[in-house]
């Protein structure tokens, strides 16, 4: 009987094995939809080893929509924005479910902290929940630095690294202190200055309104403002002596993205790009003395063009002033390794995955 049905039995064994392998493979796939300040970003990751941040980005979508400005103007999410956001989320979720067959437990939807200030956030949350049967997490502004650390630093380096994320309004980050009994403590870091706020602060020091947009005047005032910036950074370092013992420095945010894109001029598939203080110094010189080099680059390099469409020269100078002064203020920098966490768009999703992994201790 067995011999007679051997081909059919073998076929069903192989078929079952195929579906078992396929099912196992799907468990390594994760998807995230982020409703951000100015865009809705969708990412799909194939995670091989979360502890070492070993993953592939299988899909990424970035649909621009200015949401934060509308919330700031009216204190709520306009109905038109609610409709647009819902439509985009439904379309992306359909792709995630039908094309990638990702388990529901591996699909996450989040909204940026700015949405917590919207009076009618529940209207948006309820509509998306009704249409998709998925809930939305609104990221807590106080939890954001911890999420950045969990997602930007490879978990294997948690205990031996610090993170600085140079944003538009502030520079945030933190590090992890190892306590007894395998317990961890998260120490947040925050610098009052970000790319936009530093630029605004420098502009306010220009006495003659007619010179606010003059580049030579801005560079002069920017240089004069550096002692204020250094003092703030020194206060941050003095208040956190433990971070000076960390051997690795991870950097993220638009300022570092701009530097890595314009200076290195290469598309690397690595998630972490090593950089040096000297590179940042050389880049600074080009920013201030030979900016046309980057204008020329942007004509043939789409990513460079995206940087220059996001930041003008003043913003780039401010961004690099923060980066350069932070690095120069860290003692014994030559003994440390510095990395740019390139995949900023998936940091929050990596954080979510790490939180749910049995192999990573994120209890801090």
Image (cartoon, rainbow, N blue to C red):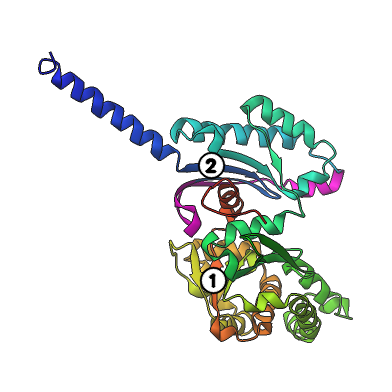
Which of the marked residues, 2 or 1, is nearer the chain's N terminus? 2
Give neighbour class at mark 1: few <14, some 14-19, many 20+ (Cα, 10 Å).
some
Q: Is residue 68 within the magenta segment?
A: yes
For residue 36, above or below residue 279: above
- Seen from this angle, which residue lies furthest front? 181
Front position in the image: 357 or 275: 357
Q: Quadrant of the N terminus?
A: top left
**Image: magenta residue range:** 45-74
In which quadrant of the rendered view does residue 173 lie? bottom right
In which quadrant of the rendered view does residue 330 lie? bottom right
In which quadrant of the rendered view does residue 308 lie? bottom right
Is mark 2 in CB contact (under 8 Å) with mark 1? no
* Residue ID for mark 1: 339
For residue 191, above or below residue 205: above
* Residue ID for mark 2: 31
- Which percent across, then down, holds residue 289? 62, 85
């Amino acid at each position: 009987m067995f011999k007679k049905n051997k081909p059919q039995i073998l076929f069903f064994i192989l078929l079952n094995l195929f579906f078992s392998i396929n099912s196992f493979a799907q468990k390594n796939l994760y998807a995230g939809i982020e409703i951000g300040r100015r865009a809705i970003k969708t990412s799909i990751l194939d995670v091989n080893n979360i502890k070492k941040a070993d993953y592939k980005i299988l899909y990424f979508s970035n649909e621009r929509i200015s949401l934060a400005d509308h919330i700031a103007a009216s204190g709520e999410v306009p109905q038109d924005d609610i409709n647009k956001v819902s439509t985009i989320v439904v379309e992306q979720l359909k792709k995630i479910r039908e094309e990638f067959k990702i388990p529901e437990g591996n699909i996450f939807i989040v909204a940026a902290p700015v949405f917590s200030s919207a009076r009618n956030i529940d209207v948006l949350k309820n509509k998306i929940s009704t249409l998709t049967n998925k809930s939305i997490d609104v990221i807590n502004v106080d939890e954001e630095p911890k999420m950045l650390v969990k997602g930007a630093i490879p978990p294997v380096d948690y205990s031996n690294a610090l993170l600085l994320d140079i944003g538009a309004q502030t520079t945030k980050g933190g590090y992890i202190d190892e306590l007894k009994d395998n317990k961890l403590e998260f120490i947040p870091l925050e610098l009052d200055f970000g790319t936009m706020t530093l630029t605004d602060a420098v502009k306010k020091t220009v006495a003659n309104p007619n010179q606010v947009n003059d580049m030579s005047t801005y560079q002069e005032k920017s240089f004069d403002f550096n002692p204020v910036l250094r003092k703030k950074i020194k206060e941050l370092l003095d208040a956190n002596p433990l971070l000076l013992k960390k051997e690795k420095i991870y950097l993220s945010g638009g300022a570092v993205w701009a530097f890595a894109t314009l200076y290195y001029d290469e598309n690397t598939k690595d998630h972490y790009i090593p950089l040096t203080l000297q590179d940042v110094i050389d880049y600074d010189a080009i920013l201030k003395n030979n900016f046309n080099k980057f204008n020329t680059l942007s004509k043939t390099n789409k990513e460079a063009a995206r940087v220059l469409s996001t930041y003008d020269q003043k913003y780039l100078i401010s961004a690099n002033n923060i980066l350069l002064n932070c690095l120069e203020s860290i003692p014994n920098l030559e003994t440390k390794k510095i990395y740019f966490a390139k995949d900023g768009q998936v940091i929050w999703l990596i954080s979510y995955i790490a939180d749910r992994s049995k192999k990573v201790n994120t209890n801090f």
